[in-house]
Image: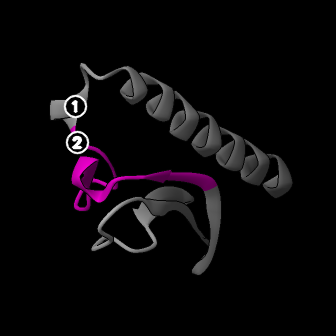
């Protein structure tokens, strides 16, 4: 099964850290930058996404939509290639 997860390149950064996507499939893993970054205090390491407690902030929805788009694009491409 294919899975996309997100993580911070430097979760202990004082300011912003780059957000990376990790794509696991067929016992392989590909990692790539999303070209986005965020302050680690807004990031939930365990869940690999923004902390829900910040859902009221304007950037929250923008980031979540961006992550969903990345995830669906990768999974769709992978499934198309498997056919």
Q: Position of residue 17 (x, y in %)?
A: 43, 63
**Dividing the picture into quarters, in which one does residue 50 lie?**
top left
Element type at mark 2: loop
Residue tagged 1: 54
Q: Is residue 72 left or right of residue 20?
A: right
Residue in view at x 52 percent, y 40 percent: 67
53 relative to 83, above or below? above
Q: Nearer the viewer, residue 14 or 6?
A: 14
Q: Nearer the viewer, residue 55 or 82?
A: 55
Residue tagged 2: 51
Residue in view at x 49 percent, y 26 percent: 62
Q: Nearer the viewer, residue 15 or 43?
A: 15
Q: Is residue 69 left or right of residue 60?
A: right
Tell me the quadrant of the picture where the N terminus can be found.
bottom right
Query: Is-magenta flag for residue 63?
Result: no
Mark 1 burial class by Cα count in 10 Å: few <14, some 14-19, many 20+:
few
Q: Position of residue 43 (x, y in %)?
A: 28, 52
Residue in view at x 37 percent, y 29 percent: 60
Stretch in magenta:
35-51
- The extreme front residue here reads 15
Alpha carbon distance from label 2 to label 1: 6 Å
Q: Nearer the viewer, residue 23 or 51?
A: 51
15 relative to 69, above or below? below
**Dividing the picture into quarters, in which one does residue 25 lie?**
bottom right
């Amino acid at each position: 099964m294919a899975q996309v997860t997100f993580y911070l390149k430097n979760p202990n950064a004082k300011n912003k850290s780059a957000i990376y996507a990790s794509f696991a499939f067929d016992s392989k893993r590909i990692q790539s930058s999303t070209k986005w970054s965020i302050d680690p205090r807004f990031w939930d390491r365990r869940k690999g996404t923004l902390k829900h407690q910040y859902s009221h902030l304007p950037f929250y929805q923008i980031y979540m939509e961006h992550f969903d788009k990345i995830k669906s694009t990768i999974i769709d491409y992978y499934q198309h290639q498997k056919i």
